[in-house]
Amino acid sequence: MASRRCDPDRVSIPSRPTRGRPAPRSRTSGSGAARARGGGRDTAVAERGRPRGENLRDGSGRRGERGGPGHGLDRLRVLLASTMGAVLAGYTMLVPVAALLTGTGGAPVTADGALAAAVPMWLAAHQIPIALNGHPLGVLPLLPTIVVVVMVAWFSRWAVLRLGGRVRHDAGAVVASQAGAAAAVAVLAGALLPREMAVTAPWASLVGAGLIGGTAAGVGVVHACGFPVAWRRVLAGWPGVALAGVRVAATGLLLTAALVLTAALVFTAPAVTEVAARLGPGVGAASGVLVLTVGYLPNALVGALSWATGPGVSMGVAASGPLTAEPGPMPPFPLTALLPVTAVPTAAPLVLLLPVAVGVLTGLACRRALPTGAPTADRIAAPLTAAVVTAVGASVLATVAGGSLGGGPYDPVSFHGGAVFGAVLLLIGLPALLTCAGPELARHVPMGNAAGDRPAPRPVPVRPRGTRQGRPATVGDLVERHRTSGAGRPGRAPAAAAGSEPDGTDAPDSSADGDNAAARDNAAARDNAVARDNAVGGPDDAPDGAPHDAAAGAPDDATAAAADRDAAGAAADPGAAGRPDDEPGR
């Protein structure tokens, strides 16, 4: 039995495993046996020789932090690390706050109690309403929500850069994983609540947490990779200008709300201090009140925005705004002492000028961002789009910041999201539109007197078809024009006006004489034209020794010469004469 020999060309030596992530697969040049012999070894050597931390290029040419892992398990590992890291980081940051709030109430603080108290706080950070002993609590603090959004955005940015930084290939997986993880943990946390707590609507926990997680992940992905190519093409025109206007309008509204809130804190500082001292007499209780006040400070900022734009804030039957005030019971909380519910301050209506100024700045930003020769439609669309987007954002914030408050006399707390949308659209959109497109729109406005005071248009004279203005149609018309205008032959007096003699007596009827004179002049003009044509024909056409002027028979009369020139021009222009060239003056 023959022994089987081992062909070294057909034996593939497995490459040594590299540290960290596996080497990407690459096809080497050469035959299949050569690739089998040295492909894996060369790849491993290249990976070991590459410095750690060096950026790698993916297939699309984009650079990630350390390159995109090509294996599916590596991608899954990165996605799990980012999602669980965001959930655990947000939950861990809420545990000390829960322990502090538990200790201010007089209850003993334990690790289990702090971890259990952080669960409803995590749900509140995702704006999921909770019922306490059957009383719904929908006014949830916005500061934990902002912290959660920042954490999710940071982890999403890290994940998309680890995957390669490709928007089309990596962004969708990161956003979907963050939204799904937030929704799943929210449902699980709702099931782990204590007996005295419950989620008012389970579907709200699923949808609300998913929306917040997905939105935060989208912000992080866009910050890392930028907008997709298709979006950048759209934003190259007036939508990009509208986006610049949105940034100016949003910043201006936030500054307006901060200014109003600061002024309210300054003017009502004694009342706020009194309420805080009555609510938390000790150091621990005062610390708890301070933590709650800081947590609800973004809600107060949204309330100041609603108050500055006109709709105001209402708590139960009590309401406060720059134009109206309705007295009523107010909850004993430091931030509620800022609202003037008894009477409207004297200078309160002047606050409405601040959003108008923001609208003017928005219009100026859009006008400067547009090119010089931008059409009027773009100058109208950019500020209006910026105002609509800003109004939608302000309305969403006003809706989320309010809610039910236990079903008591202070229920509900409303910032009037619908009214905020209309107020922002009016106070910012109209000034922005007039500032950006006002001069262009003014050019299209009809100026002058009213329609009834305008003078009637003068009738346009209608010329006969085939004639030109200022040129006679026939030689007879030319002669008649010279005769009626007074430019006759020498020795002939110009025609008198109104058909009267110089001595004031009526002139005799000379229509027959005028017709005979016109006929004679017409015949003379034809003879002169024929003579001139014969003279132009050449020296052979003239008699021997006769000058051309004599052969042409040019008259010595200046008026007849002018008539001959005009007649020749009329004969050369058939359109002006109104008849063919072979009929030179009928």
Image (spheres, rainbow, N blue to C red):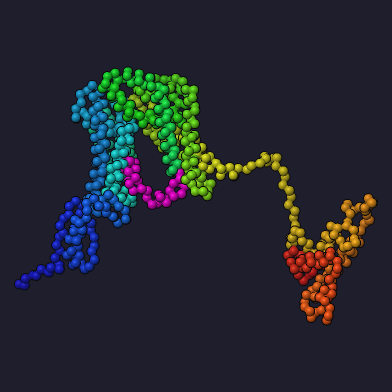
Q: Residue at x 21, y 68 (%)?
A: 31
User: Residue 337 appears at what percent x and percent y?
Assistant: 38, 22
- What residue do we see at 79% from left, 67% from top? 565
Determine whether, in the image, residue 508 is placed left or right of residue 572: right
Residue 2, compared with residue 150, is above or below; it is: below
Determine which quarter of the picture holds residue 17: bottom left
Q: Judge whether residue 501 is colored magenta.
A: no
The magenta region covers: 213-242
Q: Determine whether, in the image, residue 149 is placed left or right of residue 114.
A: right
| Residue at screen point 34% across, 29% down | 296
Between 132 and 250, the one nearer to me in the picture: 250
Q: Classify 407 as above or below 448.
A: above
Quick one: which residue is furthest to the left in this view? 1
Q: Is residue 276 left or right of residue 525?
A: left
- Residue 452 visible, this orientation: yes
Classified by dominant secondary structure, the portion drawn in magenta counts as helix
For residue 410, what is the image quadrant?
top left
Q: How far from the left and from the top, in percent, is residue 573?
A: 74, 66
Q: Give how far across and how far down residue 420 sits, in percent.
A: 44, 33
Left or right relative to 115: residue 460: right
Camera sees residue 384: no
Which quadrant does the C terminus fall into?
Answer: bottom right
| Place of residue 449 in the rendered image (x, y in percent of width and height, measured from the top left) | 67, 40
Which of the pair 573/547 is nearer the observer?
A: 547
> In this figure, what is the number of numbered marks?
0
Tell me the quarter of the image containing the N terminus.
bottom left
* Above or below, comparing residue 521 to residue 387 in the picture: below
Q: Quadrant of residue 84?
A: top left
Residue found at x 82% / y 73%: 549
